[in-house]
């Protein structure tokens, strides 16, 4: 029921077309490159854009996991954004199902349903399925890894696990890594669990014993990850370490921003005190949970914390990067409530477990109620938008489509175009494109300049008179755009 309602709400929140932010454009072009058989051409064109634009606005290529999932659907449906978004909904719903199973193993059915319900009805998360980005496919891949990790630890220790299970564990890390690169922290999470399991052997060694060290079991998941990731990189290369200016120096600032972002994700306003309270509860709950059931909760806490640290290395706050850790924050935040409810009901002889579960689930039920109050209005606005025949400002917006048609009509396939959204222009016209605010760079690197009149966003602030005086030639124009032929720099 939760998944069905969530899927219906997500689809109802979708608006015609796609937003203008053009990360999606590179994902789609890579997806199309897979079935066209020219992924190297896609990488080469985007490398040209990045190198010649003079700024790292994009990786040379995204990891190919999400494009591979998109690829058959792009083949069947083309650039039908409304249909392609259904794949986002499918990955989101799969993630919710896996979250439910992972939490149920630790907190019971009632708590699992409550946490899954709070995540599945969050308006910002549901609205995010309206964009063809990699956050939900990545969250799905990480939860598959956690699910498999649970299977291993449910039957044995990591050091005593069968070879096949350890190999699969490494391959699942590689699968998540090939959706988003921050999943490399899963290797660290596995190493942490291995180190904890080795502690008794180390104590025995200090006592004068010589316990055997299972080097094979230690190395297998890491070797399987390295072999899988390396083999995939040889087949379809992408940037292993994107150079976007990120680094550990930003973690402090991002952790300061996180409470406000968390409040927004949960529909509880924008005051950071709300999010900070939840994070403090989650930290306390993680300590309690790890002490109570270290084998189950230790790895989950490690994955959640390491994932949060990884996305916090970004040079600016991007709230969608934190979606993947939201379920674990909520689960650990419930743990102290479970403890308090257990203490309060310790003298009750019957149905104590059910009552504790219900009491601990009440905060999540409250969140679902908050979401239920907000969603009808948001859905109504989205439906009104679509019924009016409007398009999101982006590749299908009637005010934008003429410039893409003009570039296709007035430029040759070998020409280079300057445009403030390079990846979208390349997707829609197959022209190599650069984006820059430097007019001299456009003179040197581009043959045409598709200018948005009156804007200086990622393009030079040049008036029509200044363009004509500088030797630029108007090839085509309308009320919003001018397609200039760039004069020969010689």
Image (cartoon, grey):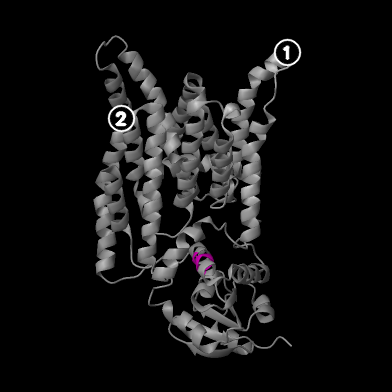
Q: Secondary structure at mark 1?
A: loop
* Residue 266 appears in view: no
Q: Quadrant of residue 356?
A: top left
What x and y, as percent, mark residue 366?
A: 29, 35
- The answer to the question of whether label 2 and label 1 lie on touching residues, with beta carbons closer than 8 A, is no
In the image, 152 versus 329, the foreground residue is: 152
In the image, 138 versus 458, the foreground residue is: 138
* Residue 408 appears in view: yes
Q: Secondary structure at mark 2?
A: helix
User: Which sits earlier in the primary sequence, circle 2 or circle 1?
Assistant: 2
Q: Quadrant of the C terminus?
A: bottom right
Q: Is residue 270 above or below residue 393?
A: above
Q: Quadrant of residue 162?
A: top right
Q: Nearer the viewer, mark 2 or mark 1?
A: 1
What x and y, as percent, mark residue 228?
A: 61, 49
In the image, 238 versus 411, the foreground residue is: 238
Q: Which residue is mark 2?
A: 110
Q: Write down the region rendered in magenta.
A: 28-32
- State the separation of the CA atoms marked 2 and 1: 46 Å
Q: Are there few (<14), some (14-19), or many (20+) residues within 10 Å of tag 1? A: few
User: Residue at point 49% right, 66% down?
Assistant: 28
479 within the magenta span: no
User: Residue at point 49% right, 75% down?
Assistant: 428
Q: Main secondary structure of the magenta part?
A: helix
User: Residue at point 63% right, 33% down?
Assistant: 191
**Residue 183, numbered label:** none
Q: Which residue is mark 1?
A: 209
């Amino acid at each position: 029921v939760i998944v069905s309602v969530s899927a219906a709400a997500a689809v109802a929140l979708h608006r015609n077309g796609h937003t203008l932010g053009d990360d999606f454009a590179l994902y789609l072009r890579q997806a199309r490159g897979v079935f066209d058989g020219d992924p190297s051409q896609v990488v080469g064109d985007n490398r040209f854009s990045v190198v010649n634009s003079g700024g790292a606005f994009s990786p040379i290529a995204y990891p190919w996991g999400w494009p591979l999932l998109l690829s058959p659907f792009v083949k069947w449906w083309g650039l039908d954004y409304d249909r392609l978004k259904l794949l986002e909904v499918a990955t989101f719903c799969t993630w919710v199902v896996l979250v439910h199973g992972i939490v149920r193993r630790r907190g019971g059915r009632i708590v699992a349903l409550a946490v899954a319900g709070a995540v599945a009805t969050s308006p910002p998360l549901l609205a995010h399925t309206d964009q063809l980005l990699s956050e939900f496919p990545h969250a799905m891949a990480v939860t598959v890894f956690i699910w498999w990790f649970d299977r291993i630890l449910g039957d044995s220790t990591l050091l005593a696990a069968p070879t096949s299970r350890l190999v699969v564990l490494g391959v699942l890390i590689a699968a998540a890594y090939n959706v988003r690169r921050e999943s490399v922290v899963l290797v660290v999470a596995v190493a942490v669990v291995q180190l904890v399991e080795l502690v008794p052997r180390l104590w025995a060694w200090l006592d004068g014993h010589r316990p055997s060290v299972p080097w094979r079991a230690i190395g297998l998941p890491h070797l399987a990850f390295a072999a899988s990731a390396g083999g995939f990189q040889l087949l379809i290369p992408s940037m292993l370490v994107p150079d976007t200016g990120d680094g550990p120096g930003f973690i402090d600032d991002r952790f300061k921003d996180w409470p406000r972002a968390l409040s927004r994700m949960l529909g509880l306003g924008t005051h950071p005190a709300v999010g900070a309270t939840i994070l403090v509860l989650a930290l306390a709950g993680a300590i309690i949970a790890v002490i109570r059931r270290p084998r189950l909760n230790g790895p989950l806490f490690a994955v959640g914390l390491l994932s949060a640290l990884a996305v916090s290395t970004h040079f600016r706050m991007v709230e969608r990067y934190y979606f993947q850790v939201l379920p674990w924050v909520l689960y650990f935040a419930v743990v102290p409530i479970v403890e308090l409810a257990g203490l309060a009901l310790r003298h009750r002889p019957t149905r104590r477990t059910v009552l504790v579960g219900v009491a601990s689930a009440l905060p999540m039920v409250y969140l679902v109620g908050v979401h239920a109050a907000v969603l009808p209005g948001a859905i109504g606005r989205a439906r009104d938008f679509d019924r009016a025949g409007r398009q999101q400002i982006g590749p299908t917006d009637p005010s934008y489509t003429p410039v893409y048609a003009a570039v296709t009509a007035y430029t040759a396939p070998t020409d280079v175009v300057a445009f403030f959204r390079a990846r979208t222009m390349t997707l829609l016209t197959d022209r190599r494109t650069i984006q820059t605010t430097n007019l001299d760079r456009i003179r040197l690197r581009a043959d045409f300049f598709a200018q948005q009149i009156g804007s200086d966003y990622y393009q030079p602030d040049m008036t029509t008179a200044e363009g004509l005086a500088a030797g630029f030639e108007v090839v085509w124009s309308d009320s919003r755009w001018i397609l200039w032929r760039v004069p020969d720099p010689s």
